[in-house]
Image (cartoon, helix red, strand yellow):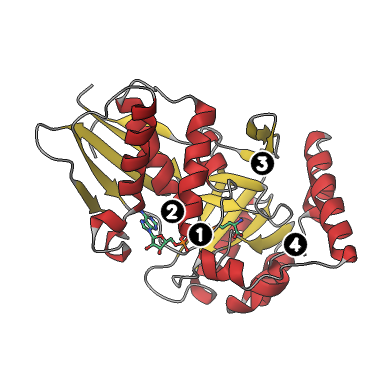
Amino acid sequence: MMSLVAYAPASIGNVSVGFDVLGAALAPIDGTLVGDRVYIAATEGEFTLASSGRFAHKLPDDYRENIIYDCYLSYAKALKKRGLTIKSLLMELEKNLPIGSGLGSSAASIVAGLEALNAFHNNVLDDNEMVLLMGELEGQLSGSVHYDNVAPCARGGLQLMLEANGVVSQSIPCFDEWYWVVAYPGTSISTAAAREILPTEYSRADCLTYGRNLAGFIHACYSKQQDLAAAMLKDVIAEPYRAQLIPKFDEVRDYAKELGALATGISGSGPTVFNVMTDLAQAEKLQTWLEANFIQNGDGFCHICKLDKQGARIVGTTL
Ligand SMILES: Nc1ncnc2c1ncn2[C@@H]1O[C@H](COP(=O)(O)OP(=O)(O)O)[C@@H](O)[C@H]1O
Ligand SMILES: N[C@@H](CCOP(=O)(O)O)C(=O)O
């Protein structure tokens, strides 16, 4: 194949209960593709990297500072270790996700970039090697390796990070009836900065609550108890410190609760918030309210989503 396009969806890191260890991929129910796309094509010339898309103007001016360029270099290195050479190619990133939004924007670029490169080279790297490489690149940007965006983005659905026995993450069953109402206010928070403000140590009480909530949520997912699962969606690790960075976060939670939301939380490091709802009419009402009250500028948006069970995929040959 002379060209192809890879798509990688937005994701919710942490999902409140699993700081750095739980993540979910998103698919808006209206069919909008909320994620980044990467085009790759054979060329006889030098490597080039172009950018386009709604949020391309927020990318670094120098293409060598774009994480897609690091994907290209890392992938070439991985091939070299196998005695292979990277093909002559050009790439274009369609940057659809806002940077510093809490929607796994850098992860979506990394995943789309590496999926495109790997598909272009007949999938030389296996799925596990790919996710490890994706985590490494994510770590370059956010200050420490965490897989809770790249794993769901690449593999789809709700992923639990295991990082044991050579297994980075595995899929957890979730509730098909849940709508995830996700609102991005249009401002940005740097993931690295939002990690810096967190305590380096936690009290024993917080550790016990954290363990109980995460274990309880996973148990409730497997035993199909949606109310119990939603009741466990509480964050004692990041939200108490990050909520103050998000204007109206408490108002969102209060209003969502009035409309029957089962849970509200910060997506990744914010400022995006997510709300778990079961009634579509109420979800639409919340969407309208968030658009009027939470979104601060023209960059913001709100989507009603289900989980994207597929994750990253090849979607065509042209952008
Ligand atoms: N393709 C890319 N997509 C997103 N961020 C990128 C990309 N390339 C480089 N960057 C840089 O990486 C950093 C990502 O910031 P971060 O707060 O981690 O974003 P996010 O939380 O949305 O992934 C920014 O400094 C941004 O300029
Ligand atoms: N677990 C990370 C997730 C960051 O997600 P992002 O979408 O804000 O990059 C964290 O909470 O720091």
* Alpha carbon separation for disc pair 4 and 1: 20 Å
**How far across and down, in percent of the image, does residue 311 sit?**
50, 36
Residue 205 in which image quadrant: bottom right
The yes-or-no answer for disc 3 within 8 Å of ligand 2 is no
* Alpha carbon separation for disc pair 4 and 2: 23 Å
Residues under numbered marks 1 and 2 in contact, where contact means CB atoms less than 8 Å apart: yes
* Alpha carbon separation for disc pair 4 and 3: 17 Å
Q: Earlier in the sequence, mark 4 or mark 3?
A: 3
Nearer to us of marks 3 and 1 is 1
Q: Type of residue at label 2? A: Ser
Q: Quadrant of ligand 1?
A: bottom left
Residue 313 in which image quadrant: top left
The one nearer the camera, 121 or 1, is 121
The circle on residue 161 is 3
**How far across and down, in percent of the image, does residue 47 sit?**
18, 41
- Please say if 111 is above or below 10: above
The yes-or-no answer for disc 2 within 8 Å of ligand 1 is yes
* Alpha carbon separation for disc pair 3 and 1: 17 Å
Nearer to us of marks 4 and 2 is 2
Question: How many dots with numbers?
Answer: 4
The one nearer the camera, 274 or 261, is 274
Q: Earlier in the sequence, mark 4 or mark 2?
A: 2
Residue matched to label 1: 142
Residue matched to label 4: 235
* Alpha carbon separation for disc pair 2 and 3: 18 Å
